[in-house]
Amino acid sequence: MIATLLTVFQLAVPTAVSTASVPQGSDSIMVVTLADALRRAANVNPDYVAALRNIVDAKWQQRAAYAAFIIPATSLSVNQTRSNEQVFNFGTGDFANRLTQAQIDMRLNLFSGLSKFFEAGRAGATVAAADANELQARFQTALLTESDYYDVLAQRELQRVAEERVRRAEEQFAIARARVLGGAAVQTDSLQLLLELTRARVDLLRQRATLRVARIELGRRIGVPGPVDAAPLDTLPSGPLPITEQQAVREALQEGPRYRAAQAGAQAAARAYSAVMGQYLPRVDLFATYQAFGDEFFLPDDSRRWIYGFSINFPIWNNAQREIQLSQAKSNREVARALRDDIGREVRRDVVAAYEVFETARASADLAEVAVVVALENMRVNQERYRVGATTTLDLLTAQVSLVESEATLVQALQAERLALAGLEALLGRRIYPK
């Protein structure tokens, strides 16, 4: 039974080999570079699009706050009434069944307890917060895109590792069959290598499925309805980062988008509190009204008059609505300050963590490269020794597993190194190395 099983499986080997070497439709898959992927992702990421629109809205608020100093609020209204009986028309001085009134109102605030100045300051802080949020959303989008991009690269490398494992397992199985047929080995050796070959092929199928999903995810990230492949990257710059950990922490707390957004939010909340305080002071407005009467709908000119002057409004008591707004503004100010301080501590922790992760991943990648070289040599030696019958099948399988694990560890270490660098760049709000 065992001999029959080995014979049948040996006949199936060429078919399996040819199947493993057939491309999986890679020629028809769109290939993007990292720079192109980052550009495409920024155009379709909802968070980044929202951040861009928030800048537009904040700038309109700033324009409105500054315009309130010099441009009066203006409104135009035209009313025409008709009656089935004639009534006295104030514009013409006669009786008519049609009466038209046109009016232009203009009002300019001259003093409101410095509230306008604080509102302008709050609008400026809102613009600064929107700019910082846009920068943060841009780098967060880039971080997610790079994560998907590096995942495709890693899964493709892992597929190559799996294909090499299948190829080596097939060669080892062929050698084992030749030794069994020559009487130099027993059939159990072939069965052990048959099991390894079966596992390698199953792992290759799984890896192909994982790579296909990773390509589809990258396509979704950059707005392509289908799988997208990642162009190969150059190796990372060797050596330590061109910035120390202390410098990175300082830069993240000064120029980092997340802390800048929190700082601008705290400033906006403080300005809002001061603006509410201005409601306790009198308000002085300058107003002017132009009225025209007649019986024509457009530009009635039978009678005209100007009304202009100024008004002083001194708020005394409005059923505690002002006090409620002041209490809410004070609460918002205290919460914004606490959030800013907490984000400062969090950014410091995240920078240190990202820096340490990068250094650890870099050291792990260097060690993994050495481990791959050692595992390749160990595999070569054991394979040659097995060919001449100087070692056992167990030693050969152990060398095979060690090589696969070391190659996978190297791929994962390189991916972790790139992701750690991208995370640090997102905290700093700038590129350390050009993409």
Image: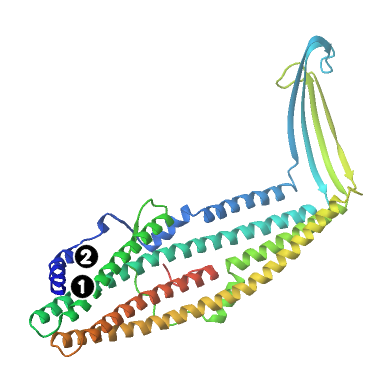
Instruction: Give the x, y percent position of residue 146.
Output: 43, 65
Q: Residue furthest left?
A: 182
**Any mark on residue 264, and which?**
none
Seen in the picture, residue 247 relative to 116 is either above or below; the reply is: below
Instruction: Give the x, y percent position of residue 396.
Output: 23, 84
- Left or right: 430 as drawn, with respect to 69: left
Seen in the picture, residue 40 relative to 194 is either above or below; the reply is: above
Query: What residue appears at the point 11 percent right and 82 percent down from the top-left corner?
Result: 179
Under mark 1, the amino acid is: Arg
Q: Please report contact status of discs 1 and 2: CB closer than 8 Å, yes or no.
A: yes
Question: Which quadrant is the N terminus positioned in?
Answer: bottom left
Q: Which residue is mark 1?
A: 167
Please tell me which residue lies in front, 43 or 11. 11
Mark 2 residue crowding within 10 angstroms, few (<14) / some (14–19) / many (20+): some
Q: Which residue is mark 2?
A: 20
Corner quadrant of residue 414: bottom left
Instruction: Give the x, y percent position of residue 417.
Output: 43, 75
Seen in the picture, residue 87 relative to 126 is either above or below; the reply is: above
Under mark 2, the amino acid is: Ala
The answer to whether one can see residue 365 in this image is yes
